[in-house]
Amino acid sequence: MLLWFRIASEGSPPERYTLQVPFQLGPKRRLTPADAKEIAFGAQRLEVIDNQGIQLLRVTGFRSFEKAEEFFQRLRGALYYLTVGHKLSIRSDRDMQMVRLLDSPVDVRGNPNWGEICEQKGWTQLDGYVDPFPAVVIPEHLRIMEIGVGPLSVTIGTPVPMFLEHLAGVLALPKPESITADERLSLAIDLYASSLWETSRRARVVSLATALEALIKPERVSQAASDQIDQLLNAFDSARDCLAEDQKQRSESDSIRSRLASLKNESISERLRRLAVAHASDIGVTTEQARHKMVSAYGVRSKLVHDGNAPEAEIEDAAAWLDKAVPAILKSSANEVSKAR
């Protein structure tokens, strides 16, 4: 836990509000004193801070909690965008879903934990502590003293100036918050971010394919095919003798009927083929190559999920294709959503 104290006078309002978000980018390395850590973005400043091993993204200069909360949605969308463009992985699960206001200052007058140290200086309250893991808005008073201690919470693997420039560029898009609001797209990007930390190619193939599955919407087969399935269902129902079925037989028959009825939904593999073809130019391949590679990669994914194994050469080829295709498809989708007015 990061202890971060700021001094406040009795009844004094905050001077500013700061949005603070933990994140992780790329391979682990510590920030160095040579890293530039701050960049202007309109009335705000974007900065990456390092306090005894704890590194956090902070956006300063808000005049109210509501303004910081509103900006948080844009920031979440921008981080999603950078995930697929620069392999950024947000490592904070549900704590990134919403932002909370930090607790009010703590009255330290007569507090035995502080002796008379604060009263001798004329200090009446402390802003308390800042937990580095959830996203928070910090009401900041006149900062006379800061103390920080705690474990490592985040690491940076790309030059800080470059990261902040990329972030500012995405924040300037018309609607980056739309990426967060799109539940399918944001889930797909979350799954992609998780796949960056898989320990084997087998797991990576499954994770990347699952990210694309989350992106596609259910679709029905053609009306002619649906009519044929209805005929099959009617034949199945006519052949059943429900009165003669015991509980186990009834359950098995109902399960079979449900599987037959599900044939009215287009298969996941077919929808993924169309998705790849639609984004062939984004991936940098021909439509035929996109179709063939997606069929092959999803076939490997199915072998791994159902059989637990697949030929190593096929796994390697599927991983290489998905490594190229998935971020390209997600980035194109994020571009379309975030630029829509």
Image: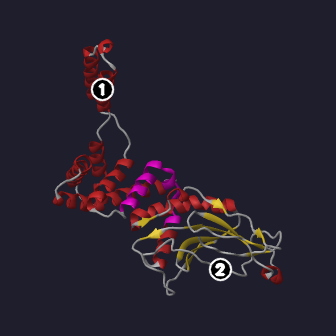
Residue under pointer 1: 252
Left or right? Give the position of 177 relative to 232: right
Mark before the other along the chain sequence, 1 or 2: 2
Q: Is residue 272 above or below residue 141?
A: above
- The numbered dot on residue 216 is none
Residue under pointer 2: 147
Look at the image and tell me whether residue 175 can be seen.
Answer: no
From the viewer's side, name the closer residue of 322 and 144. Answer: 144
Residue at the limit of the structure toward the front, as seen here: 112
On whether residue 278 falls in the magenta region, the answer is no
CB contact under 8 Å: marks 1 and 2: no
Q: Residues within 10 Å of mark 1 (few under 14, many from 20)?
A: few
Q: Which colour scheme is used?
A: secondary structure
User: Label 1, label 2: how many angstroms apart (C-alpha)?
Assistant: 65 Å
Look at the image and tell me whether residue 315 can be seen.
Answer: yes
Q: What element carries label 1?
A: helix
Q: In this view, does 143 lie above or below 338?
A: below
Left or right? Give the position of 307 relative to 326: left
Q: Mark 1 belongs to which amino acid? A: Glu
On whether residue 184 falls in the magenta region, the answer is yes
**Position in image of residue 261 (x %, y %):** 31, 28
Q: What stretch is highlighted in magenta?
A: 170-195
Q: Overall secondary structure of the magenta stretch?
A: helix
From the viewer's side, name the closer residue of 123 and 170. Answer: 123
Q: What element carries label 2?
A: loop
**Position in image of residue 243 (x %, y %):** 33, 12
Q: What residue is shown at x 28% (from left), y 39% (from top)?
A: 267
Q: What residue is shown at x 60% (from left), y 67% (from top)?
A: 131
Q: Mark 2 belongs to which amino acid? A: Ile
From the viewer's side, name the closer residue of 196 and 116. Answer: 116
Q: In this view, does 87 lie above or below 35?
A: above
**Position in image of residue 244 (x %, y %):** 30, 13
